[in-house]
Image (cartoon, rainbow, N blue to C red):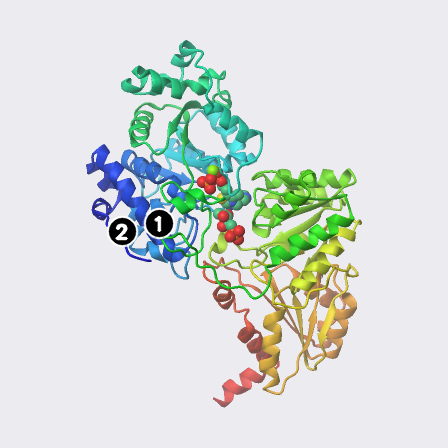
Amino acid sequence: MTDRPVTPLLDRAKRPADLKQFSDSELTTLARELRQETISAVSVTGGHLGAGLGVVELTVALHAVFDTPRDKIIWDVGHQCYPHKILTERRDRIRTLRQKDGLSGFTKRSESPYDPFGAAHSSTSISAALGFAVARDLGGNIPEGLGDAIAVIGDGSISAGMAYEAMNNAGHLGKRMIVILNDNEMSIAPPVGAMSSYLSRLYAEEPFQDFKAAAKGAVSLLPVPFREGAKRAKDILKGMAVGGTLFEQLGFSYVGPIDGHDMNQLLPVLRTVKDRATGPILIHVLTKKGKGYAPAEQARDKGHGVAKFNVVTGEQKKAPTNAPSYTSVFAQSLLQEAAEDDKICAVTAAMPDGTGLNLFAERYPSRCFDVAIAEQHGVTFCAALAAGGMKPFCTMYSTFLQRGYDQVVHDVAIQRLPVRFAIDRAGLVGADGATHAGAFDIAYLANLPGFVVMAAADEAELKHMVATAAAHEDGPIAFRFPRGEGRGVDMPERGTPIEIGKGRMITQGSKVALLSFGTRLEEVEKAAEALEAKGITPTIADARFAKPLDRDLILSLAADHEALITIEEGAVGGFGSHVAQLLAEEGVFDEGLKYRSMVLPDTFIDQASPADMYAVAEMNAEHIEAKVLDVLGIASLGAQRA
Ligand SMILES: Cc1ncc(C[n+]2csc(CCOP(=O)(O)OP(=O)(O)O)c2C)c(N)n1
Ligand SMILES: CC(=O)[C@@H](O)[C@H](O)COP(=O)(O)O
Ligand SMILES: [Mg+2]
C-alpha cells in the first residue's frame, strides 16, 4: 500500500525556518505527520527505517530550536536522517531514497547545505562537530555561516574509539558545542559492552541522593519549570546521583536523561542549552528505535534495515532467492571448520547478523566475540588471539575494515600473525552507495608483506577458502566475497584447502586470456559466450590469489596469448597492478604482450543496484566483451568500416 498520509502541517513546513511559526503543540502534531511520511516513503524504497522513526521528535525539535543550515546538525552514521531530509527541502524526492539517481540514504554534503558533514561509517560526528565549532571560533567563512555545532550520536556508535578521542579533545578545548546521545538501547543488534551497561545505569531506577551537588552542575542550565519540578529534576539528576558521569569527567556538562519522544522535555532543554551553553554539553536523550510503527518496534532489529513493505501489515517484499547468500555459505562453512577445531574463534564489530556470525554465537558462544563498533580494537584483539595460539576469523565488511587498517599493518602483518580476515561486502554493494563500497581491500592488503589475499569466484570457492584460511598458520590470510546470493553452483560437502598461490584454469581458448579475480568470473563467462558467437574463444582463468600471485599461470597465459586482461571488483592498485608489476619485471611487455586491467574507475560511484553500479564502472559482461574486441583491434576495425 503506497497511499500518502494526510499531513497538513508538514505540507506547510517547506523549510526548517517555517517551524519557527508553529506552537509547541503544533510541533508535536508535525512530528506525528513526519513519522507517517517517513514510514510511507520507506515502504516504497526500503532502507533504514527504525533509526529514523526513533528520532522524529528530536529532528523536529532540533530544527525548531536551532537555525539550520547556519547551525550544523551532524547525524552520526546518517542512517537516521530521513526525517531530517523531509524537513530540509528534500521531501519531493524522499521516495527516491537509495535509488539510482535518487537521494542518498545517508547525509551527503553534495546533496544539501543542511547536510554539513557526510557520514555512513559511525562515530565521526563528535570530531566533526568539534571541527565546525573551532572553525567558527577561528573565523571560518562559508556561505551558510557557522553557528552551533550539534552532533547526534547513538548508543551503538558511541562505543567506538573515535568518539572518545573527540570528547577528550573537546573537553580539553572547552568550546561551545552540543552532543546529543541518542540512547535507544540498540545498535543493529542489541548493543554489547561495558559502555552500554554504563549508559543503562545512568537511567536505572536509583534513589536520588545528592541534590546539592547536582544543583551546582547541569541543573543550572535548565529552565525554571525544570528546576522546580521535583520529578523532572530527579530524572535529570540521576546521572549526578551516580557520582558524576563519565562525560562530565571528560569536560562536558551532562544534561539528562530526557524522554526523546516528549516535545515538552525536548524543546525546553534544547532552548535552554541554546541560550546558555558556554562549553561542551552532552544531552542524554532516551528514545525507542522503530518508535510509532508496530512492525518495527516489534522486530528483533527494531526495523533497522527493511525491504519495501506493506504499511498496513508490515510485510516486507523480499526478492525470491535462487541460491544461498555468500554470507550464509561463509557462516555455515566456518561452523563446519569450528566443529573440527576448537581453536577457531570469530570476531565481529557490531555486525553479528550481517556477517552471519549470529549462527557462530549461538553454537559456540564462548568462542564468538561481538566487540561493538570497534574495528580497530577488533583487529588488534584478533592479533593477540592469534599470538595466544587461537585461530581468529576477523569477520568484517570490506568498508569497515578500512577503519582498522593501521592495526592490520602494525599488529597483524608486521608480526606475521595468522589472523584470518573474512571480508564480506567486497565490491559494489548497491543501495548503501559509495560509502559502503568494498573497493579498496585488495589494494590495501595485497601490498602488505606476508599477507595472503584470496577472492572467491563463487560460493563453492568460498567454502574452499574458509577451509584454506582455517588451515593456514603461516601469517595473515584474507578472503573476500560479495553481498548477495551466490551463483547456485554445486557445493562440496566440506571445503578443501587450496594450495596457496595457485589459480585455476576454467577454459582453454586462444588469442586472448581473461584472468578473473573474484565474482566477476560470471560476467567473464557471459562475455566469453557472446565472443564465441563472433568467433573468438578466450581462455578463462580464475586467479584465486592476488597474493601470492600464481606466477606460472600468469606467465604462461602471457606467453600463449596475444592479449591478457585482468578483472577484479576493486580499485586500481590491487590484483591487476600486481600482475602488471610481475609482467613488467619479467620483461613480458618487451615481447609485445597487450595487457589491460579492468578495475573500478577512479571515482566514487553513487547508489544503485549492484548491476547498475557495475555498469557505471564498465565491468559487466558487455564491457568485458568490448574490451576484448578493442584489445584485439576488432572493435576499431568495425568502427572504421562504419
Ligand atoms: C565504522 C562502522 N562500523 C559499523 C557500521 C554498521 N552500523 C551502522 S548503524 C550501526 C548501529 C548504530 O547504532 P546506534 O549508533 O545506536 O544507532 P541506532 O541505529 O540505534 O539509532 C552499525 C553497527 C558502521 N556504519 N560504521
Ligand atoms: C548503516 C549501516 O552501515 C548498515 O546498516 C549497513 O547499511 C548494513 O548493510 P547490509 O544491508 O549490507 O548489511
Ligand atoms: Mg542505538
Q: Which amino acid, mark 2?
A: Pro
Q: Quadrant of the N terminus?
A: bottom left
Q: Residue at x 77, y 39 (%)?
A: 387
- Residue that protrudes farthest toward the bottom in the picture: 641
Contact check, label 2 and label 1, Cβ < 8 Å: yes
Q: Residue furthest top?
A: 212
Residue 634 % position (x, y) = 58, 84
Q: Which residue is mark 2?
A: 5
Q: Name the one closer to the observer, 168 or 156.
A: 156
Q: Is residue 117 left or right of residue 3?
A: right
The front one of 499 and 208 is: 208
Q: Which residue is mark 1?
A: 39
Q: Is residue 445 above or below residue 292?
A: below
Residue nearest the viewer, comparing 146 with 370: 370
- Label 1 element class: helix
At label 1, the amino acid type is Ile
> Which disc number belongs to residue 512?
none
Rendering coords of residue 420 (x, y %) = 71, 49
* SS under mark 2: loop
Q: Quadrant of residue 265?
A: top left
Q: Is residue 332 above or below residue 377?
A: below
Mark with earlier residue (2, 1): 2
Residue 46 higher or lower than 262, as above or below: below
In the image, 610 versus 48, the foreground residue is 48
Some atom of ligand 1 lies within 8 Å of the CB belonging to the residue at label 1:
no
Q: Residues within 10 Å of mark 2 (few under 14, many from 20)?
A: some
Q: CA distance from mark 2 to mark 1?
A: 9 Å
Q: Is residue 562 visible?
A: yes
- Asked if the residue at label 2 sits under 8 Å from ligand 1, the reply is no
Q: Looking at this rendering, what residue extends furthest in the front direction?
A: 313
Identify the residue at horizontal 33%, vertical 34% (top origin): 147
Residue 115: give x, y in percent of width and height.
37, 45
